[in-house]
Image (cartoon, helix red, strand yellow):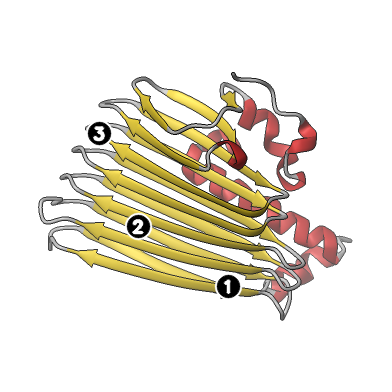
Amino acid sequence: MAKSLAYSETMGIVQNYMDKILRGRSVIRDNFRRTNISSDTKLLMSSADIPNSMFNIGEGSCLDIIILALDCDRRTIRLTFELEKFSQLKCVILSENCKNFDISVDSILKGELANSDIGNFFYGKNSDGQKFSISQTHDAVNSKSNVVSKTILDDSALSEFYGKITIGEIAENSDARQSNDNILLSDMAQAISHPDLLISNSNVKCSHGATVGAIGDDTTFYMMSRGIDIPACKQLVAEGTISSILTIILGQEFI
């Protein structure tokens, strides 16, 4: 049954956004297996409640879902989204303080004008690690997908990103985009990115990109010149990164 998530269960970095995230969403604490979405639905879930789940988003329906992964160790989840004609998916995964966290997401656009937007944010420190595998499969004309994955890694944290875009022969006018951006706060942190494209139709748009780097010296200097110390600087960068993902995937309400 749906119930309220206690603030103690949420990520400290996203505290400023919890009221907006919770507003209008059903909080689910039961294990999902297969769920049919036949109307516009907003959900907030813990990664512990969806170890292996499939969502079928019916014609003209929209699923807006946020998944929190907090303080987990050796957790694996598998998510499959099937999008029918005119359907829409908005999915954001936020994780912090997770060791050996393995998440795999398959977004299958089966219907014309289906639209899939997926965002992933991972804040890792100490020996935290996340493996994020995302597959965007276009099996219909005029379908659109976008994946935005951002990580901030400190100490000896590790992030692995595996992204695959598949566009079938009949999926003319498909538009698929994918980006993976990583900020390293330590010389020991690591970010690995593996993009993969399989395109079987020439009349499509596809793009992918990855970046790895530290916080810019100009950014650090600007903040410190205004009395902001290094820990607070890192916190502000993390909050800004989350804000950008929520805004890109879920809309302007998170600015």
Residue 213 image-quadrant placement = bottom right
Mark 3 neighbour class, 10 Å CA radius: few under 14, some 14 to 19, many 20 or more: many
Amino acid type at image mark 1: Ala
Residue 60 visible in the snapshot: yes
Residue 168 image position (x, y, % from top left): 16, 55
| Nearest to N terminus: mark 2 or mark 1 | 2
Residue 231 at x, y = what percent? 84, 62
Disc sitting over residue 191 in the figure: 1
Would you say the residues marked 2 and 1 are in contact, meaning their CB atoms lie under 8 Å apart? no
Mark 2 sits on what residue?
Answer: 177
Mark 3 vs mark 1, CA separation in Å: 34 Å
**Amino acid at dot 2:** Arg
Question: Taking 49 as reference, is 37 left or right?
Answer: left
Image spot of residue 96 (x, y percent): 69, 52
Label 3 to label 2: alpha-carbon separation: 19 Å
> Which one is in front, 224 or 190?
190
Q: Which disc, if any, is residue 101? A: none
Q: What kind of element bears circle 1?
A: strand
In the depicted structure, whether residue 225 falls above or below residue 12:
below
Q: Earlier in the sequence, mark 3 or mark 2?
A: 3
Q: Which residue is mark 3?
A: 84
Check the image and name the residue furthest to the bottom: 187
Q: Residue at x 74, y 48 (%)?
A: 13
> For the residue carrying disc 2, how many other residues have a C-alpha within 10 Å: few (<14), some (14-19), or many (20+)?
some
